Image (tube, rainbow, N blue to C red):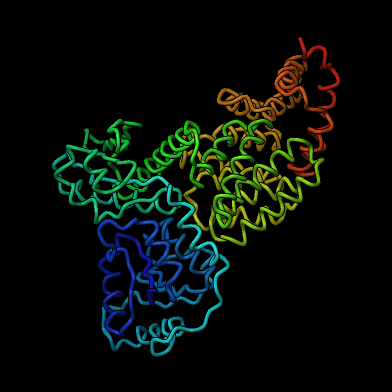
Amino acid sequence: MPDIFLSYNREDQATARRFAEGFEREGFNVWWDVTLRSGEAYDEVTEKALREARAVVVLWSRKSVESRWVRAEATLADRNRTLVPAMIEPCDRPIMFELTQTADLSRWTGDVADRTWQAFLTDVRQFVGAGGTPPVLPAPRSAVAADSRASSTDARPSLAILPFTNRSGERADDIFADGMVEDLIAALSLSGQIKVIAQSATIVYRKNVSDLRTIGRELGVRYLLEGNVRRAGASLRVTAQLVEADSGAILWLQKFDRPLSDLAALQEQLVTEVAGHLGVQVQRHEMEKALKKPGDLTAWETVMRAMSVSGRLSSDGLRAGIADARQAAALAPNYALAHAVLTHHIATLYMNDGGRDEAMAREGRAHARRALALDGNDPTVLSLVAVALLFLGSWHESLAYARRAVDLNPNIALCHVNLALICLRFKMPDETIRHVDAAEILAPRGYQTYLALGYKGLAHFQAGKFEQALQVIEESLLLYSYMFSLKDKALCLEKLGRHEEACEAIRHLRAAEPSLSLEGIERANTLVFAVETAQDMNATLRKVWLDTPLESAAT
């Protein structure tokens, strides 16, 4: 257990080293990412150190306040009451930390006798414990999950990001290429869905990437990412490809071109975009593998099968997903994600059915409580539980958990998609659109894109922008003919005075889901949307529905 976890931005590494050495002189055991050993999984080691550290020292600078990774680490430390922040240069801290007492060490140069430094050490010792004796702290809520998470998620996909090749021949591009790899490792590790090998284990392959299958075996990983950077006039091109280690097959290849105006901003944009594409591809491949596997599934694989129904949220698909999630929870009873997926699917089926089955609602709430008790600090768990609680009628809890999920890790597309939906309940269309746009950057054309677009269309509907709403909803339907998107298309058409086309959309809906009833859809609208929005939707829908008899739908 480290005394101190040091959180900082990569560009402040020289300053961070001064702090690390200063703490070590005082006898503290300091963890910072340069201490990672070859072969260690970046996400597992970093998260373990972050959660176990008695004090998390966050170094705020102009760069670190803009870093999603530093903000995520600071947020988790704040939740765990281990946050000890310091300013290393004048900057505006994130607003949620403005009221946290923060030492100003922007002028500290390493002098051990400096009064400000000595006062800061006193604060740190209060967290670590005087004389090196740790204070007695309550066990975290996720303590039960800590051991089970390791065993339950051993089957998570593992990835090594090989050193990017600089094909420009310019020294500045060497630094850029190395920074890309470092930031991609951090970005993918924070999602918790992929095990990422530390950069210290892959750096030895800078000059030798000829046999990817051998490298995969030596590192013990399922996937490899390799890439290169090169200049083309006033632009920089980054090319990346994802390779399956066992077969050497290229699963994904893409080029990213950006102007060279600002390398620092360019790197952050590219990291977000590459990580987004890569995360989508790995998850899609893992789902496909789990769906094809005939039996002997691990808990992780079973959860992947269960989550795959998010690409087809029909009642039959949800029932299949519920069965898979039940199996995952049976294989690993203390696996929080299994319970979170189970409550999400149960609650979604409950909503699809118009909220009539109270036994189903009780079971959904029970699994939501279980997921939160096992790991209430996992953003994906929080986000899935939030949607379940929305459908089960606990709207304010739903919003709180969804926002907390995004605060803990703003780099998970699923968390933004789910928060976008919940914002519709509270009639916040601008916030809905903002989170949909964030999700599209993080997971372009991901398996839930059709849902995100549907939510964006409904945000325009709430704002009275029916033409825009219709355009976005039709784009969503091109990806997947989701029954509620067909309903929303009919609503937009009716609002635009296109009654016959609205009736045609209802015919398609009733043909696709013959068991749907007007009353069930009206109850579902009431569960999900703000009161005024639901009333408006239901009045408009009833008029169209009654003009579209079942006989017409059958033909």
Q: Residue at x 54, y 44 (%)?
A: 303
* Residue 16 drawn at (x, y percent): 30, 69
Q: Is residue 233 left or right of residue 306?
A: left
Q: Is residue 494 above or below residue 103?
A: above
Question: Which residue occupies the foreground of this view, 287 or 513?
Answer: 287
Question: Which residue occupies the foreground of this view, 450 or 15?
Answer: 450
Q: Is residue 170 left or right of residue 525?
A: left
> Split into 4 quadrants, where in the image is the N terminus?
bottom left
How many numbered tags mark residues here? 0
Which of the 4 quarters of the picture holds residue 170?
Answer: top left
Q: Is residue 383 left or right of residue 160?
A: right
Q: Please say whether residue 548 is visible from this viewpoint.
A: yes
* Residue 246 drawn at (x, y percent): 30, 37
Q: Is residue 48 above or below residue 174?
A: below
> Split into 4 quadrants, where in the image is the C terminus?
top right
* Residue 45 drawn at (x, y percent): 37, 61
Residue occupying the far front of the picture: 296
Q: Residue at x 65, y 42 (%)?
A: 345
Q: Is residue 80 left or right of residue 124?
A: right
Q: Residue at x 42, y 41 (%)?
A: 279
Q: Please say whether residue 90 is visible from this viewpoint.
A: no
* Residue 523 drawn at (x, y percent): 81, 38
